[in-house]
Image (cartoon, rainbow, N blue to C red):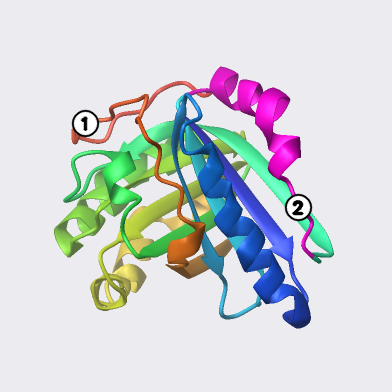
Amino acid sequence: MLAKWVTCDVPAGARDAFGAAQARWTAVADQPGLIGQVGGWDPRTGRAHVLALWADADSHRVFLRDRHDALADASGYRGIEVALGESVLTLPGTAATVAEAMDGPVLRVADCHLAEGAEEHFADVQRRVWAPAMEAAGVLGGLVASLTPDRHLVATFWPDTATHRRYVEQVPDLRTRAAVTTDLTAMTGHVLALEPSWRVRPHRVSTDIRRVAPTTTRAG
């Protein structure tokens, strides 16, 4: 599974136009390999973020070749950052699949920069510490994607802000148990109330990631 994380700087006066452009991406709901696409505004920075999940890199490449340019619209944004990475860990929750978890209204993303040699320990504590705590707290599901060997994205979907807020109360203790300071050189967090009109639900989900215990796969 391929994760695509997009960040856009959008001036205040262009937000409506940008939102309207995002709504037009529902036209690719029939694209083979698309698992789903969601997005929203970061209330702290005002930046727009979009997360798209694809079955694999090949299906995303076909989409870029055949349909992306016809729909792409700058809509007044001043800068865009795009990061791609393979899923290395599925995070279980109350939803049966990651695709179903994407229907949740709240997305939490932790953009993690790892210390040299920390990748194995980081993955281990995701399985042993973070994933069980989030599942117990009521997370819908999520994934960890390796953007580069030293940059990982942890994306989780939540049923509401209250459930996520209750989970956040545990985070200081979880950070200690996970020995976060030994793994991370930097981490940027985003909590997004997802915009309903930006959501792209595929007509047919081409991958079926069932609810299982967290497992790892090799990136790439």
Give coordinates of residue 157: x percent, y percent.
Answer: 34, 56
Q: Are marks 2 and 1 in contact (CB under 8 Å)?
A: no
Q: Residues within 10 Å of mark 1 (few under 14, many from 20)?
A: few
Residue closest to the eye, 122 or 164:
164
Is residue 220 visible in the rendered image? The answer is: no
The magenta segment:
56-75
At 63% from the left and 21% from the top, the residue drawn is: 62
Q: Which residue is mark 1?
A: 210
SS at circle 2: loop
At 25% from the left and 38% from the top, the residue drawn is: 97
> Is residue 69 magenta-colored?
yes
The image quarter in which residue 178 lies: bottom left
SS at circle 1: loop
Please report whichever mark, 2 or 1, sits nearer to the chain's N-terminal start: 2
Residue closest to the eye, 29 or 97:
29
> What residue type is disc 2 on?
Asp
- Residue 199: numbered disc: none
> Is residue 159 magenta-colored?
no
- Residue 73: numbered disc: 2
Seen in the picture, residue 97 relative to 86 is either above or below; the reply is: below
**Residue 213 in the figure: left or right of residue 27:** left
Tag in front: 2 or 1 = 2
